[in-house]
Structure formats: C-alpha cells, structure tokens
C-alpha cells in the first residue's frame, strides 16, 4: 500500500479480510499496526503501551510491524494539517490501529479530531469495558462487582456536529425555521442562541444494538440494557429504545428475550443461553451502576449518554488512568483509551499508561490474539497487585513503589517475560 507521507515497514504484511460474510480476519504473524501517539500525555502513554504490547506479541510467538501515523499536534508539526488523509487511509487499509488522545479546543478552534476520525472511518461502536483489576484502589466498597461493557453509538446524536454558533447568521435562519415554519413559536428565548440538531437514525441505532447483542451472545453475557432518556426526548431517545427492542425481537429468535416477555411468559426465569434485553432511563442508570452494579452486563447507548455512563463506571474501577476503549466498525478496530490528553501532565513521564495498554488488549482480542491479550492483562494486574504503580494509584495505596510511565511499562514487560 502506498502513501505520500508514510513509510510502511517492510517486515509487515497487511491484515486482510478472509470471509466477507462472516467478517473473519486472516491475521498474519507480523501485521502492520498503525499507531498514533496523540497529543499531550499521548507522547508518554503511547510508547509505553507500544513496548508492553510488543512484549505480549513476542511472548506468544508473533511480532508487530508498527506504522507511526500522525494527527493533531504531531500532524500540524509535520504536514501543517490536523488530520492527514494518509492517517485515515492507513487505519482503514490495515483494518486495525491504536491511538492516544487528541486535544479538542473548547468553544472556538477546530472541531474534534476524534469525532472526525470516527465519522470518516465509520467506527460506529465505541466499546468501553469496565472491569476491576485486583489491587486497584476504588471509591466503592465492592469494585469487583463492576464488570460492564458499554457499546456507545459513535457517529450521530448531538455529537454529529450539526450546530450553529450564536454569532453565525445562519443560526437566525434556523431559529426562524423552527419557530415560524415548524410551529415551535415562543420555545426559544429571545437574544443570542446556539442551536444544535440531534439526529438518531434507525440505521445508526440498529447496527449499534446488533453489535451489543452479538457481543453479549458471543461472550455469554446475561443482559443488554438500552439506556435512554426517552421519557423526555420521545422521538430521539425514545425511538432509540423502540428500534433497539425491534432488533431484539425481530432478528435473534429464541436467543434473545425481552425483560417484559421474561416476566409475562416465564415468571422472570431466564432461559439458558438467552440474552435478556431491557431498558433503563439514563439518569436512573447512573444510580443503578452504583447501587445495582451486579445486575448489569452490556449497555447499549447513544453517543452522549454513553460518554457519561462509561466515565461513571470507569470511576468505580480506578478512573481514567485505567479505563480502556476501542472504536469498532465493520472489520475495523481503532483502540483508544477513554482519557484525554491531560495537557498539564504532558511530557512528564508521570501518568498511568494502563488505559492505553488495556486498549491494546482489546485490539489483540479483535485480532484473535486472545493468549497475548490475557498475558498482557494479567501482567498489568500482577504489577499493580505488587504495588508498583504510577502516581494516580500510588497516592491511594499504603506503601508501594511510585513508578514513572515508562517505569511502569518496564515492570509490566518484566512480568510478561
Ligand atoms: P483528561 O482525560 O485529559 O484529563 C482529566 C484528568 O484525568 C487529568 O487531569 C488527570 O488527573 C486524569 N487522567 C487522565 N488520564 C490519565 C492517566 N493516563 N493517568 C493518570 N491520570 C489521568 O480530560 P480533560 O482534561 O477533560 O481533557 C483534556 C483534553 O483531552 C481536551 O482537549 C479534550 O477534548 C481531550 N479529550 C480527548 C479524548 C480522546 O482523544 N479520545 C477523550 C477525552 C478528552
């Protein structure tokens, strides 16, 4: 594959799709994996995660041909643009990649590069597992009860970018359209206004809910919970719920049962091998993840709700330094930690690389490298259990050794080896 700005390493081969009907990947022993360190602390956690993942691959008889790609500050420095076409193309071509955080200026400036990447790659499911590793300090009494996976719709909702600044003259045309043509007069206060549009489509909802249900079936999870605020936003969030149930009821036969049917026909008794689909109002869900943690497995959410809920779940298992994620499209995976670029810690070799390392674990699972994934995850856990941790965990643990970002990565590599 040829790019104007990137040199593909010679030792690597590409990752190719074998069977289009099953999307099964044929993964070579030395796949090319694009890696984007990202902004801020990305330059700390990126190389740290890279060394750990490489060790995990080597220890299981494989190798990785890393392809450095650029976006954000690193791309501005090199090419004078925020998001080079080659960066997007390389991830699409190799069907896999891992990225660190990218800074998004609040208010003015350029739009989110993360959102742009997700939209251009059509990675429509942002998957955020939240599980507790032994030894990680937590603000709750039973962090081990937290074992949820959030499937967050990644391409629409109020994140779609259809919005108008209060100083943009178009905003007054939108106001006039809404009030005069659509009949919502007197619903918007006079004076300056910013307006955004919240599209929730049947297509976007159903493919996300399908991915969540498929995952629950494959992993033997008990429930998929549709999270929404449909009592208030009936035609967007309420419709997300209804389309979600349509997928559950129409596409999976006996493999999936709704909670209502479970009670109406089976007195609440869940059949073996079946996944139960239920729904919860988003604000209630934020309580339930704390008070009824054990009752939930897989959450299917719209874009904004999923961002909030997965961060709240992440707080129970050690916070942003720990929480991993990955963006999935059809036969495409771009792993990325939940956290941002934390500019005040950038370049200090201080922050926790665990979230980025565990995002790499998700990438390994996508490649079918489950042995390497388990090895890396166990080595991270072992390192934390031995109280060799970065500052964020060290300050919450009695005793222990405070390690730098690279020092923690070295300790994990030692455990792998
Ligand atoms: P942030 O996640 O960057 O940092 C918030 C705080 O969390 C930090 O100050 C730090 O205390 C802690 N933290 C984060 N990562 C950590 C780590 N690896 N180890 C230890 N502690 C860690 O959130 P923010 O300050 O709201 O955002 C900063 C920038 O990052 C913004 O420009 C934002 O838009 C961007 N952002 C990017 C992504 C992404 O690239 N996917 C995600 C979230 C935020």
Image: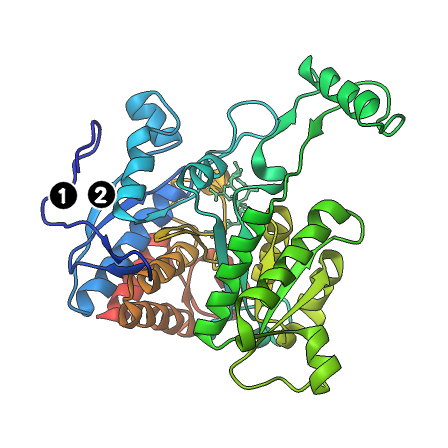
Whole-percent x and y of residue 164? 66, 23
User: Which image quadrant for residue 100?
Assistant: top left
Find residue 209 and report its image quarter.
bottom right
218 relative position to 372: left or right: right
Colour mapping: rainbow
Numbered circle sitting on residue 67: 2
Find residue 9 and name its label.
1
Foreground residue among 321 and 275: 275
Question: Which residue is located at x 30 percent, y 22 percent?
Answer: 79
Q: Residue at x 56, y 54 (%)?
A: 206
**Residue at the spot 66% in from the left edge and 38% down from the top edge:** 198
Q: Give the mark nearer the N terminus: 2 vs 1.
A: 1
Q: Position of residue 129 (x, y in %)?
A: 49, 63
Q: Quadrant of the N terminus?
A: top left
Residue 179's spot in the image, x, y percent?
Answer: 82, 24
Q: Nearer the viewer, residue 309 or 27?
A: 27
User: Which quadrant of the figure has residue 218?
Assistant: bottom left
In-front residue for pair 197/339: 197
**Quick one: quadrant of the C terminus?**
bottom left
- x and y percentages locating residue 354 in the rendered image: 41, 59
Q: Is residue 15 left or right of residue 114?
A: left
Residue 274 marker: none
Q: Few, some or many C-alpha atoms within 10 Å of disc 1 (few <14, some 14-19, many ≥20)?
A: some
Contact, CB < 8 Å: mark 2 with mark 1?
Answer: yes
- Would residue 45 be seen by someone viewing this image from the given angle? yes
Depth order, front residue of 69/41? 69
């Amino acid at each position: 594959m040829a790019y104007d700005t990137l040199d593909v390493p010679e030792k690597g081969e590409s990752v190719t799709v074998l069977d289009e009907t099953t999307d099964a990947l044929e993964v070579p022993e030395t796949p090319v994996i694009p890696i984007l360190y990202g902004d801020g602390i990305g330059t700390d956690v990126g190389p740290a995660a890279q060394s750990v993942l490489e060790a995990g691959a080597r220890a299981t008889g494989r190798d990785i041909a890393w392809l450095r790609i650029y976006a954000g500050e690193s791309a501005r420095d090199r090419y004078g643009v925020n998001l080079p076409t080659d960066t997007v193309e390389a991830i699409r071509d190799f069907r896999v990649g891992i990225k660190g955080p990218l800074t998004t200026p609040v208010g003015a400036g350029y739009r989110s590069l993360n959102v742009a990447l997700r939209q251009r790659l059509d990675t429509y499911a942002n998957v955020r597992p939240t599980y507790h590793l032994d030894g990680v300090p937590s603000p709750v009494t039973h962090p081990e009860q937290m074992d949820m996976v959030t499937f967050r719709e990644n391409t629409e909702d109020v994140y779609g970018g259809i919005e108008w600044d209060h100083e943009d003259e178009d905003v007054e045309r939108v106001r006039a359209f809404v009030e005069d043509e659509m009949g919502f007069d007197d619903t918007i206060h006079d004076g300056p206004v910013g307006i955004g549009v919240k599209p929730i489509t049947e297509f976007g909802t159903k493919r996300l809910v399908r991915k969540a249900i498929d995952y629950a079936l494959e992993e033997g999870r008990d429930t998929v919970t549709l999270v929404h605020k449909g009592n208030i936003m009936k035609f967007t969030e309420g419709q997300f719920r209804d389309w979600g149930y349509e997928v559950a009821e129409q596409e999976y036969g006996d493999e999936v049962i709704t909670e209502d049917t479970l009670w109406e026909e089976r007195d609440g008794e869940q059949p073996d091998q079946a996944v139960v689909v239920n729904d919860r109002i988003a604000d209630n869900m934020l309580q339930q993840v704390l008070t009824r943690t054990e009752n939930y497995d897989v959450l299917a959410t719209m874009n904004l709700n999923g961002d909030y809920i997965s961060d709240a779940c992440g707080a129970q298992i050690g916070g942003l330094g720990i929480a991993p994620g990955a963006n999935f499209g059809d036969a495409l995976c771009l792993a990325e930690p939940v956290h941002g670029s934390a500019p005040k810690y950038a370049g200090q070799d201080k922050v926790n690389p665990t979230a980025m390392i565990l995002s790499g674990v998700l990438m390994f699972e996508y490649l079918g490298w489950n042995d390497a994934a388990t090895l890396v995850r166990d080595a991270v856990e072992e390192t934390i259990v031995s109280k060799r941790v970065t500052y964020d965990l060290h300050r919450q643990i009695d005793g222990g050794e405070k390690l730098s970002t690279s020092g923690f990565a070295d300790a994990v590599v030692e455990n792998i080896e």
